[in-house]
């Protein structure tokens, strides 16, 4: 149960309707929508799969692969 009201508003009514960038389904967008143009079915496909760290073999979540391993500190560019 939400304990706060949703106060997001549209700048113009044309911003509400769109299509999924991956499958073309019609979407109703909300202000500050974080799906980045994908429907919920395709959202999981737009996030890279997890990978194992080459140093310690810990699993790095797909959305964190660019920032490196939080366990051993390995960084993709060696910096």
Image (cartoon, grey):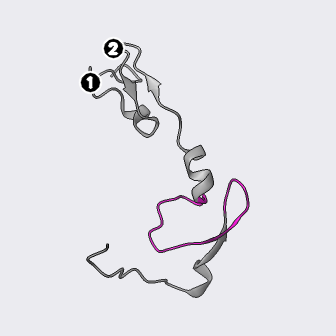
State which quarter of the image contains the N terminus. Answer: bottom left
Is 27 contained in the magenta span?
yes
Question: As displayed, is residue 51 above or below residue 45?
Answer: above
Which of disc 1 and disc 2 is earlier in sequence?
Answer: 2
Majority secondary structure in the magenta region: loop
Left or right placement of residue 12 versus residue 58 in this view = right
Residue segment shown in magenta: 20-39
Q: What kind of element bears circle 2?
A: loop
State which quarter of the image contains the C terminus. Answer: top left
Q: Which residue is mark 1?
A: 71
Left or right placement of residue 54 versus residue 74 in this view = right
**Residue 61 placement (x, y as % from top left):** 41, 34
**Residue 16 placement (x, y as % from top left):** 58, 79
Q: Which residue is mark 2?
A: 56
Decide which of 59, 18 is in the foreground and name it: 59
Is 66 contained in the magenta span?
no
Q: Quadrant of residue 25?
A: bottom right
Residue at 53%, 43% in the rendered image: 47
Q: Residue furthest top?
A: 55
Question: As displayed, is residue 9 above or below residue 51?
Answer: below
Residue at 44%, 40% in the rendered image: 63
Neighbour tally class for label 1: few under 14, some 14-19, many 20 plus, Cα within 10 Å = few
Q: What kind of element bears circle 1?
A: loop
Q: Quadrant of residue 6?
A: bottom left
Residue at 31%, 74% in the rendered image: 2
Labels 2 and 1 touching (C-beta < 8 A): yes
**Residue 12 placement (x, y as % from top left):** 55, 86
């Amino acid at each position: 149960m939400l304990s706060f009201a949703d106060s997001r508003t549209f700048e113009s009514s044309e911003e509400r309707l769109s299509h999924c960038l991956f499958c073309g389904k019609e979407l109703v967008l909300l202000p500050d929508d974080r799906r980045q143009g994908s429907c919920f079915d395709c959202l999981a496909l737009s996030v890279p799969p997890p990978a194992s760290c080459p140093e310690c073999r810990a699993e790095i979540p797909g959305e964190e692969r660019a920032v490196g391993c939080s366990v051993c500190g390995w960084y993709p560019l060696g910096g």
